Image (tube, grey):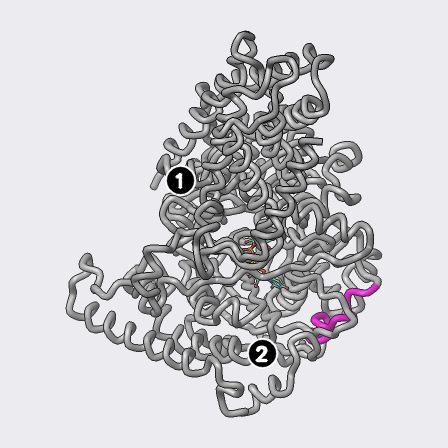
Amino acid sequence: MANSNSSPLYERLEHKNTMHKVMEFIILFLLLSLLVYRLLSFSNHGFAWLVAFLCELWFTLYWVITISSKWSFVEYKTYPDRLLQRVAEHELPPVDMFVTTADSELEPPIITLNTVLSLLAVDYPTDKLACYVSDDGCSPLTFYSLVEASKFAELWVPFCKKYNVQVRAPFRYFNNDAIPSSKNSGEFKQEWKTMKDEYMKLNRKIEDAVGKSIPFDLSEDFSLFSNIERNNHPTIIKVVLDKEEGHSNGLPRLVYISREKRPKHPHHSKAGAMNVLTRVSGLMTNAPLMLNVDCDMFANNPSVVLHAMCILLGSNENQNEIAFAQFPQIFYDGLKDDPFGNQMAVIWKYLGHGIQGIQGVFYAGTGCFHRRQVIYGKLGNQELLKTFGNSKELTNSAADALRGETKCPSMLLKSIEAAAYQVASCEYEYGTNWGRKVGWMYGSTTEDILTGLSIHNRGWKSIICTPDQPAFLGCTPTGGPASMTQQKRWATGLLEVLLSKNCPIFGTVFAHLQFRQCLAYLWIFTWGLRSLPETCYAALPAYSIITNTHIFPKGQELAYYIPIALFVTTNIYNISQYIQSGLSIRAWWNNQKMGRITAMSAWLFGVFGIVLKLSGISETVFEVTKKDQSSSTEKGTEEEDTEAGRFTFDKSPMFVPPTTVLLLHLTALASALFGLQPPAHDGLGSGRLEVAGSVCLVLCLWPFLKGLFGSGKYGIPLSTIFKSAGLTLMFCTLCRS
Ligand SMILES: O=c1ccn([C@@H]2O[C@H](COP(=O)(O)OP(=O)(O)O[C@H]3O[C@H](CO)[C@@H](O)[C@H](O)[C@H]3O)[C@@H](O)[C@H]2O)c(=O)[nH]1
Ligand SMILES: [Mn+2]
């Protein structure tokens, strides 16, 4: 095409969203009015008034930060076709692809191997790709699955490319039994059937291996795994697929790495794993770009790498400003209407693209392409050794990477074996800058946001890339306990950053973090803190009904309409965003409910976790979330499916606060209904707004109301109910006295 050289590889589209902005200001105005009203009537009221004021002050400040973060909605459109016309295949930069897994029980190897297969099969020159799998579980099963998957890949990858298969994770591709009808040639049908049979065989092999202590004969490779403890073992590095010298087998390289672990050495969870991947790949292939995904995030769009290249090779003037290209987290088989409120589609859309208009989207830990140079930082030669550690081979490769040279070694392991084992050992990082100035940053269980922040601090930008066909799809946790565990880890991890020297405010004052980008980071880092005002505010209506006082304006005051208007506009505003994102009102309501529940349980415990850490009582841990096999070969029973979205419980203390708040409101409403309230002091007792607030909370806590009467995992454990009842009783007694 004549003009293909001049047409850009990506376009930046700004959206005005005027209606949203107007509503955002109306909401802000109402919040401020409420604050003014509280201040003016302060003298007539007591402690509860002060609490309400403080909570509302927090909500207002938070709203200002939210408006700023959402303000500049910017979207990027990428054109991979133009890229292929402009850049010759051999000029495309190599990419190292990282997959992390940590536990073969919580993360079934069949999921991991599907992710790996989808990456091996992407549309990109295979000799430019290498896939590295980090296994923090040091599981022979994972290794075995990888070896078996690599054999299957020899059939699968050519098949995908021949027929331009769109979804290259076989468990998704073979999800329904019917042969895709779009391609009807007899040859295709035949090959499709063979492929499915082969995949089923692979599946069976792995299923057979699960649960056996030694699932395979201890041949040379597997013997490395015998008598190994997960947290106490030497490094294992195995090249599963290599390039034979001279000829290519049409598959990318594939390497299995289980880094050394010793009980006394901190392993820094995923961040530590990422740094080992970075170093080992630096020695082996040293690609200038690195993609990383969680084990459950398969490539759902075969052109992902090309889309990312559009941005990272991009237009000349700013290609050196963009540090990473992040694809949004989207989930497959997400339960309908997001009953656990963890699909975050609206957040990704409005906050993700809003921040895009400032310095760029946050790094979200998965589905992201980084520049190796940026991850390494900018350094002079004399600093290299101190920064990167004592491996001469690694410092040389890092120096190459920093100069923008990549000499891709043709022999993978043999020549550099010793160096690879050295950089994967647990003592290697001592006295270096790994985790502090280079690589993935340590000190938070949300290493992703922290690492992205450290990049933005240095003045880099980032871009969110949203091709029409979602680039990566992963699992969300289902059920109450798993969702809460994840949310608690996030709340803790984010607070760990907020309360450390990495706090974004320092980044703005002393480094190159833009002011509004700092606000956007504060928006996310304060998730955990939101639990405090939310929980207090949730208790207020119950308090006022029980004591027959009022915390909202009375009917005869003009201010009476402020909370009502606030309630109405906020909900219209929120609902409109759900509808514009193609979601249902039910999804909005579920998120609304879960927002309240999460704040009172998981986020609150995130704060406790931080208090314990700061007082030196306990460390924070990265608890891996369980990945469900859902739509692979095993289907849940019918009965389970109908209950899929129902909230589940366990004995975790996290469920105590929401249960308590629920019991409190039930008590309050009952006392109002049966006229058991004490007489009001000034004739101004609790009124309609307090009762409405109380009813709202009961509705938000509906899953817990059902849980009071449910049984098994659907029921709140008796011990939790007793604790909550005790707390409710205490609260009521305190109120009355
Ligand atoms: O010691 C560990 C712990 C975890 N992981 C891996 O980290 C990934 C994310 O773990 P998961 O339990 O799935 O956490 P999520 O909350 O679902 O992950 C989100 O949040 C994390 C930060 O809290 C980010 O690291 C992830 O990329 C992001 O998807 C998985 O591939 C794990 O195998 C390790 O490699 N080593
Ligand atoms: Mn996950």
Q: Amino acid at mark 2?
A: Lys
| Picture coordinates of residue 346, whole percent (x, y) | 46, 37
Q: Amino acid at mark 1?
A: Ala
Q: Is residue 90 visible?
A: yes
- The residue singled out by tag 1 in the image is 587
Where does the C terminus fall, quadrant-wise? top right
Magenta span contains residue 343: no
Real-space CA distance between mark 2 and mark 1, rounded to the nearest whole angstrom: 45 Å
Task: Find residue 203 and report its image quarter.
Answer: bottom left
| Picture coordinates of residue 123, whole percent (x, y) | 40, 58
- The residue singled out by tag 2 in the image is 238
Q: Under tag 2, what secondary structure?
A: strand
**In the figure, is residue 603 to the left or right of 217?**
right
Task: Find residue 283 and report its image quarter.
Answer: bottom right
Q: Which residues are magenta?
A: 419-430
For the point 37% across and 68% down, the residue is 157
